[in-house]
Amino acid sequence: MLLLHLLSHDFPLCTYVQVAKIEQISSRKANGSSVITISWYYRPEEAHGGRKSYHGRDELFPSDHYDDINVQSVEGPCRVLTRGEYTYNPDLDMIQCTCCEDFFHAACIGATNEELPYLSNLGFVCMECAMAKEAAGALPGTYRK
C-alpha cells in the first residue's frame, strides 16, 4: 500500500497535509498526462462526530471517497501505521501488561499517570489476565481496581 502527501497549493482550503492511498495509476488518452485514482484518509475532525478524547493526535481513517488527481499533485510517499503497529492514542501515557503485552491508558485501569512507573516496576497485569490467572489459581487477588 502506497500512501502519499498531496501538495497544499493544489488544495487551497486545506491547512494541513492531505493523505490518500493510491488505488490506480493511468494516463489520459487526450493529452497523455498521468492520473492517479486515490482513496482519501480523513482526520477525526473531518468525520461525522468529530474528534474525541480517545483519538490520537495523528490518527487517520480510511474512506470510500475516491478521486482522480493529476500526478503533479503528489508531494511524496508517507507511511500510515495500522492499529497493530501503533498503540492506541499514543498521546496519553500507557502501561503494558506483562502477560498479554497489550497497552492500557492509566485512566482505563483506574490509575494516575504518576502511578504507572510504580505499577510497571511491580509487573503490571491487566484485569483480563489477572482474572484468568486467578481462576487458574496462579495469581490470588493481585489486581486492584
Image (cartoon, rainbow, N blue to C red):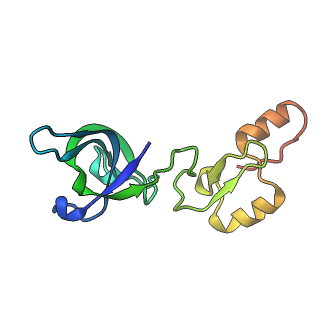
Residue in front for this viewpoint, 16 or 135: 16
Nearest the viewer among 86 and 55 is 86
- The residue drawn where x is 58% and y is 52% is 87
On the image, the x and y values in percent for residue 42 come to: 32, 49
Q: Give the quarter of the image for residue 128.
A: top right
Q: Residue at x 56, y 51 (%)?
A: 86
Residue 102 left/right relative to 99:
left
x 63%, y 65%: residue: 113
Which residue sits at x=76%, y=60%?
120
Image x and y of residue 110, in percent: 64, 54
Residue that protrudes farthest toward the left in the picture: 30
> Residue reaching furthest right?
137
**In this view, which residue lies farthest toward the top?**
136
How far across and down, in percent of the image, does residue 3 sit?
A: 39, 49
Residue 121 on image: x %, y % = 81, 62
Q: Nearer the viewer, residue 113 or 72?
A: 72
Quadrant of the image containing the N terminus: top left
Instruction: Classify residue 85 as left or right of residue 79.
Output: right
